[in-house]
Image: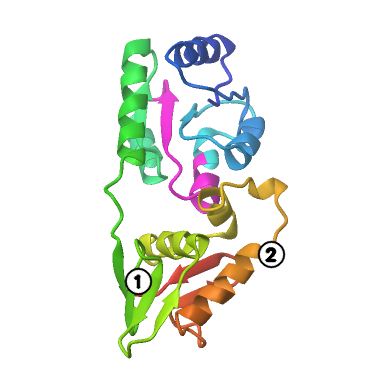
Amino acid sequence: MIEDDAAVRRGVVDALEYAGYRTLEAGDGDEGLRMALGASYRLLLLDLVMPGRDGFSILAELKKKRAGQPVIILSARGEEHDRVRGLELGADDYVMKPFSVRELLARVEAVLRRTCERAAPEDKRMIPGGEVDFSEGRIAFEDGVEEALSEREGELLRYLLEAKGRVVSRDEILRHVWGLDPAKTETRTLDMHIMHLRSKLRDKAQDFLVTVRGKGWRVVS
């Protein structure tokens, strides 16, 4: 939770922890941005007006560097343009102050259900010249040749395919596929997995698994 009003922050944090959630908290925008980009968490509760970075700028940074992160805005600013701007920047919900603890917990549970209980991923996906069978851990090409995928290679390929053409950053992959904190991780293992995947996908020209310089990778369907 990022909220500069200590009384509001304490009340919400206490309610969340009483309901069984583990929490992190920050009292200004600058500290909050560092926490929002670096910590491991499922949902961010975000005030808009506070010292340092405001909530809108934090949302914009999250959209660039931590795509898909669930966010609920908690704000006394209820004008339509503020609500629209927050939702356009990627917020999942907008809760007006003052709010009841019961309402907030219901909103938290609803957003977590929407963002965490996704449909089961497909076991088979078509790729250029063949098909990936994730349940079997293999790629079967139309000429009859098969390539085995390691568990991590399969997880990486599935994640890239499910991004549906979106550029996926190194930090996002390390966080969601490897379960590592990118700020505390120096590893070339991701580059090696990308190289091995391209070899197994017969993607020597990098037409399918494309490197976007300085940003990450994307799959071209």
* Residue carrying label 1: 132
Measured as percent of width and height from the top left, residue 9 is found at 54, 15
Find residue 27 and report its image quarter: top right
Q: Which disc is residue 188 wearing?
A: 2
Foreground pick, 117 / 114: 117
Tag 2: residue type? Answer: Arg
- For residue 100, say whether it is visible: no
Tag 1: residue type? Answer: Val
Element assignment for label 1: strand
Residue 69 highlighted magenta (yes or no): yes
CA distance separating discs 1 and 2: 25 Å
Foreground pick, 115 / 133: 133
Residue at the image point whose x is 45% and y is 63% from the top: 154
> How many numbered discs, if any?
2
Of the image marks 1 and 2, the number of the one nearer the N terminus: 1
Residue at the limit of the structure toward the bottom, as seen here:
143
Residue at the image point whose x is 31% and y is 55% from the top: 121
Residue at the image point whose x is 47% and y is 75% from the top: 209
Element assignment for label 2: loop
In magenta, the rendered stretch is 59-78
Measured as percent of width and height from the top left, residue 61 is found at 55, 47
Say which of marks 1 and 2 sits in front: 1
Quick one: quadrant of the C terminus? bottom left
Find residue 173 and report its image quarter: bottom right
Measured as percent of width and height from the top left, residue 20 is found at 45, 17
Crowding at label 1, few (<14), some or many (≥20) Cα neighbours within 10 Å? Answer: many
Measured as percent of width and height from the top left, residue 90 is found at 40, 44
**78 relative to 200 in the view: left or right:** left
Foreground pick, 103 / 75: 103
- For residue 103, say whether it is visible: yes
